[in-house]
Amino acid sequence: MKKINPEELIATSKFNRFHLQLIFWGFIIILFDGYDLVVYGTVVPVLIEEWNLSSVEAGAMGSYGLFGMVFGAIVLGMLADRFGRKNIMILSVFLFSFFTMLCGFTDNPTSFSIFRFLAGLGLGGVMPNVIALSTEYAPSRIRNIVVSIVLVSYSVGGMLAPLFGITLMPSLGWEVVFWIAGIPLLLIPFIYKKMPESSSYLIRKGRDKDLIRILSKVNPAVQLPKHVEFSNDDHLKTKVPFVGLFQNKRAMSTILFWTTYFMSLLMVYGLNTWLPNLMIEAGYGLNSSLAFLMVLQGGSIIGTILIARLSMKYDFRIMLALLYAIGGIAITLLGFGGNSMYIYLLVGIAGASSIGAQHLIQAYVSQYYPPAIRSTALGICSGIGRFGGMLGPMLGGFLLTTSLPVYMYFLAYAIPGLIAAIALSIVPGNRAYGKNDADFKDNELLELEGRIIQ
């Protein structure tokens, strides 16, 4: 019986229909994840007027969903490494789609806040698992590209929310933008059928036939023998995934990642929630302010793809640190105003350097940790980050009750970007999982196939 390492087979695979399908469904899931999260920022100016909310109350309502995401990211992320990433991912899709849709049927802040919290559980749990699966099954040479393409759909969803707000709310009301969030409920059977389960989970459960079936699609160039024993390079000293985050000298990196996520999400969710209102404070109308929100998301798409491409040549971690620093500078400059083209440019750069950087840090962290603790690492990082995300809307709501100059509002969201840049720049790059592994080349694929057949 031959011993096969699935990670090697996947790393040497060529991009094919399986990977395209993985990207497609991951893209769709994260698109609605982004839509459901940004949709509140789209309707908050209307809700403030219709429900007679103060800015502090509106900020608190925005934080309830993020509070749910804290629990969803941590709990569902850890459960995924034990009970299967696909199962937890499907549960997450149901939670965020169903309860975001219900927000469109409520007429009071209390039930709206409850539904946002419950939707937040799913919003927190879905991204770590989609990222982990995308990382696990992508060919090594294009892993950053695959993960980044999936993640930019978050920004596509974030752009659709204000777009629907501009086009549909005037005639159909704010409720319709929440009803749209129920569409993924219809897609769950297809997602369950098409998305693969984690190879590390299948190995632990002894589901060799399922793994052979998946690997035959991932890497058709390698013919697996009938009798095979699967192994991997993931040697953990504990069966508790959380403990693994601090083993093999990863403790410092883990703490620095938590810091980066906290500051990054404070900046991202603060801008997603309050950018329209901040631009209104600066003298722009509602539709123009929603357009700025679209530019913010559009900039993140360009930034994500561009840096993902460059990461194939340059140090990924250093580029991310620089991106966060640039974001802090761009957000600061927004507070001082200027002509429309200049402001649109700054908003686009801010999107690339805040939301785009947050997409890319997910891709980096997903490859930093070994597969058996990957969902746990991403989930807890996201969970810690959600505390920053909760603070972001609340901070904006508080600041808008003060008489501070407009530039101070933007500076409050710029400083976290600079802190994130510093934290990420001192992460020990040599502690990354697989750091010393050589990149596979085409001739190594033939050598690997030879070893398996023998």
Image (spheres, rainbow, N blue to C red):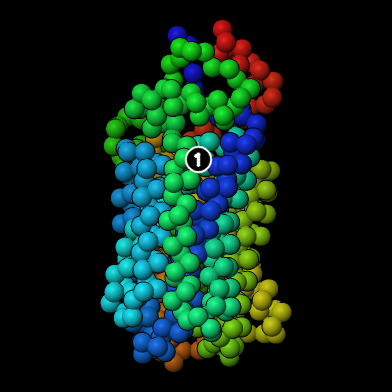
185 on left or right of 328: left
Q: Quadrant of the C terminus?
A: top right
133 on left or right of 292: left
Q: Counting other residues with Cα less than 10 Å from the Cα at mark 1, is it few (<14), some (14-19), or many (20 or more)?
A: some
Q: Is residue 389 visible?
A: yes
312 on left or right of 154: right
Task: Look at the picture and state if 166 lies above or below 21.
Answer: below
Residue type of the residue flagged with mark 1: Lys
Name which quarter of the figure residue 292 lies in: bottom right
Give the x, y percent position of residue 140: 60, 35
Q: Is residue 357 visible?
A: no
Give the x, y percent position of residue 130: 47, 47
Name which quarter of the figure residue 289 lies in: bottom right
Task: Look at the picture and state if 314 lies above or below 215.
Answer: below
Q: Quadrant of the N terminus?
A: top left
Residue name at image x 67 percent, y 26 percent: 441
Give the x, y percent position of residue 374: 42, 41
Residue name at image x 28 percent, y 37 percent: 240
